[in-house]
Amino acid sequence: MDERRQDAARFVEMLFASREMRERDFMWPGDHPGSREYPHPLYGLYRADIELNTDRFLRQVRLVQEHDAFFPCISIRNLASPIPVDLFSIVEFTDVFDRRDVTASIEYVLQRIRILLERADLTFKPMRPADAVNLFKNLLEEFVYVRMIAEERHGTLFSRLFRRRRPTKASADFLNFEVFSKTKDLTVRYSPAYFVNPNLVFGAPTSPTSPVVAPIMPGRYIFGLADRDFPDFFPQEYDVPPQRKAYLPR
């Protein structure tokens, strides 16, 4: 294992440790937080999106654990492993908790996800929460590794873009990614390849294929086309960078 892969693994472990520590000290709204600080990796990695997704995932894991349910994942043909699905990107939080029987409501949500995936020719794969956590960590490590390599090789560009300095044309061009498809006038969706959110529109909603050009943060992603309830993600992962283009076969 090279040094950056070890760094990516440590980053993920420290991220989860900080979340577990915060859970132990959890306070309800209205409480006054203490002065305790939580550990963060010392790497200068841009991680706002990673922390947001991790927090969403862990909240959903607790939900299914409390009600002895499975966590939804999808299996995309030819990809090495399934990917956890962001529950609340598909259904509203209140769809679950506004019902008297939360356990039955979760089962309803999982069944709804299964139907949406089948319509998009994707395979629904429920997993035990502990297995879903391990899967999420492993996939996140790969995502973080790609971002670490990018920041290591192009650090000055990221400093200008994400540390409130004026970006240069070179730094903006570096983050541009192009998506091509055979079918015209469809919306491109994308998702980090560790936590599937089917609602992320690549580029502007008014920019249908093809091509669509837009900036994207470094990492590992999947792409699909949306003309139904759940986009038909194509069976390829894209490491951005070095990859700068995606050709969708539909």
Image (tube, rainbow, N blue to C red):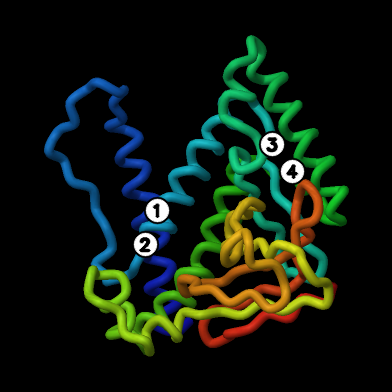
Q: Position of residue 185 (x, y in %)?
A: 77, 66
**What is the C-alpha distance between the residues marked 4 and 3?**
6 Å
Instruction: Please say if the residues under marks 2 and 4 sit with CB atoms less than 8 Å apart.
Output: no
Q: Position of residue 78 (x, y in %)?
A: 80, 71
**What is the C-alpha distance between the residues marked 2 and 4?**
28 Å
Tell me the kind of residue under disc 4: Pro
**What is the C-alpha distance between the residues marked 1 and 3?**
23 Å
Secondary structure under the numbered disc 3 in the rendered image = loop
**What is the C-alpha distance between the residues marked 3 and 2?**
28 Å
Q: Which is more N-terminal, label 1 or label 4?
A: 1
Depth-wise, is mark 1 or mark 3 nearer the camera? 1
- Identified at 28% across, 85% down, the residue is 156
- Identified at 25% across, 77% down, the residue is 166
Instruction: Please say if the residues under marks 4 and 3 sit with CB atoms less than 8 Å apart.
Output: yes
Asked if 7 appears above or below 171 in the picture, the reply is above
Q: Position of residue 179 (x, y in %)?
A: 67, 77
Q: How many marks?
A: 4
In the picture of the structure, the residue carrying the numbered disc 3 is 70
**What is the C-alpha distance between the residues marked 1 and 2?**
6 Å
In the picture of the structure, the residue carrying the numbered disc 2 is 47
Please identify the quadrant where the C terminus is shown.
bottom right
Depth-wise, is mark 2 or mark 4 nearer the camera? 2
Q: Residue furthest front?
A: 206
Tell me the kind of residue under disc 3: Phe
